């Protein structure tokens, strides 16, 4: 497939750029130690992440006015703590723990791959995470973004078409010149509906080592590029 | 003055971070050579820049709906070309020339100073230039921004208070923790009204060597910091 027209790459982040699960488990264990709480922190991380879709949908359906992801994470943290019968945590300590989502480790190929890709393309996160969250994560993990796009600048969460379209509008590019990169097939299929080409980079360990939680590895045949990781993506895009 | 609370620095760009005048003159001379046009390109650059305020004011007063700076530059380019009696230029060539504002040279201290400051602070442009313009300029000049804020994300041009306030909102910081850096005293005084501390970095050569065009070098006594350049700013902020 000819990709010579592509000028910018926009990236899903949670799962695609960073390993949210092991990073949240690690920080949850630390939170437990600080507060003398024992829990199944793997299950806690999965439960917190599982609230992500339903809480965003409350914004997407108009039940909530625009609310950024930090605030949605904070609301869902209250629910998960209750589900795990964890009580007596101060609001200040919960606010601090909520920042765990700002400090997620990149996959090993992420930063070297992005530096390769940056030579040829504008690179931006196209995440449901808010600007401050992406900014802190970029500084923490060393991701060399050129600018930060995503849900907060569009005031629409993915997979609303407005989210992808706003990224292209702010880049002043036709959607056909902006490639969406993600480990999640639904994200790519929705970006394709707006006219963006797609790069599928599977992240088989996103949900941990349990085979029952492995994402479907079979790429939809409509994807423009399928790459093993970000360095392979740079190879395939000639960057 | 105690600046230990400051977590982010936001920067005026045209004149403060980059030397717009010599960069536009250089690209205008090149445009003239390509199209066989002779003109006083110093005067041309000054005339184009002089349209900046009046065209933005058409947005700020509501005469025009939100229009990004690239489009305002393009509208004002038509007027300046007419004033200089330059005719017969294709729309495509004018569109290309308009991108000159994306490729402005940083002052010599800009990039080394920003790298020093980046170790301690979140750094973002807080410019009236749009996201794509700032993105291209950052890649061209090597400015290591952590994110891009400014007029386009606020849909308000400086010095509207909403422009500064939106930057603080997106950073999820109190204005007192966000320092505005600029070579233009009015920009700083307006940011201060919203509650931001200020750093004045005079750029005596912004308008060229003509003494009649030198900006007033006497800093308003209300500024939090006055620095000779970005490296001196890093020294003063302990970064």
Image: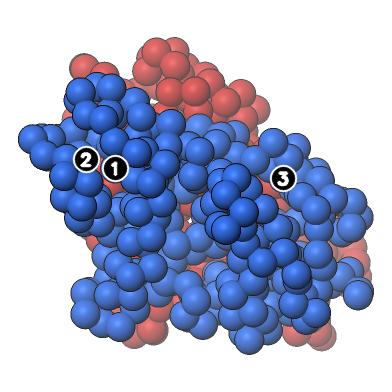
Chain colours: A red, B blue
Spot occupied by residue A29 in the image (x, y as percentages of width and height): 81, 57
Find numbered disc 2 in the image and state the secondary structure of the residue it sits on. helix
Spot occupied by residue B232 in the image (x, y as percentages of width and height): 84, 50
Q: Residue at x 39, y 13 (%)?
A: A238
What residue does disc 1 label? B98
Residue B95 — which label?
A: 2
Task: Tell me if A165 is positioned left or right of A111 in this view.
Answer: left
What residue does disc 3 label? B114
Q: Residues within 10 Å of mark 3 (few under 14, many from 20)?
A: many
Label 3 chain ID: B
Nearer to me, A161 or B130: B130
Q: Earlier in the sequence, mark 3 or mark 1?
A: 1
Do the residues under discs 1 and 2 have CB atoms within 8 angstroms?
yes
Spot occupied by residue A76 in the image (x, y as percentages of width and height): 56, 75
Find numbered disc 3 in the image and state the secondary structure of the residue it sits on. helix
Residue B235 visible in this rendered orientation of the protein = yes
């Amino acid at each position: 497939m000819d990709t010579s027209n592509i000028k910018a790459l926009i990236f899903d982040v949670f799962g695609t750029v960073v390993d949210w699960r092991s990073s949240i488990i690690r920080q949850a264990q630390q939170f437990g130690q600080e507060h003398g709480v024992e829990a199944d922190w793997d299950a806690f991380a999965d439960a917190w992440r599982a609230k992500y879709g339903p809480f965003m949908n409350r914004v997407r359906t108009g039940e909530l006015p625009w609310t950024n992801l930090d605030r949605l994470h904070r609301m869902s943290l209250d629910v998960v703590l209750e589900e795990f019968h964890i009580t007596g945590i101060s609001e200040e300590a919960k606010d601090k723990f909520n920042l765990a989502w700002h400090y997620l480790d990149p996959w090993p190929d992420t930063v070297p791959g992005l530096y390769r890709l940056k030579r040829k393309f504008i690179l931006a996160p196209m995440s449901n995470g808010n600007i401050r969250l992406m900014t802190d994560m970029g500084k923490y993990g060393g991701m060399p973004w050129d600018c930060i796009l995503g849900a907060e600048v569009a005031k629409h969460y993915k997979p609303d078409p407005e989210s992808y379209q706003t990224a292209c509008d702010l880049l002043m590019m036709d959607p056909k010149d902006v490639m969406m990169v993600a480990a999640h097939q639904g994200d790519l299929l929705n970006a394709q509906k707006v006219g963006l080409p797609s790069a599928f980079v599977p992240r088989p360990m996103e949900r941990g080592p349990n085979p029952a939680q492995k994402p479907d590895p079979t790429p939809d045949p409509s994807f423009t590029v399928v790459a093993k990781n970000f360095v392979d993506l740079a190879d395939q895009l000639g960057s």
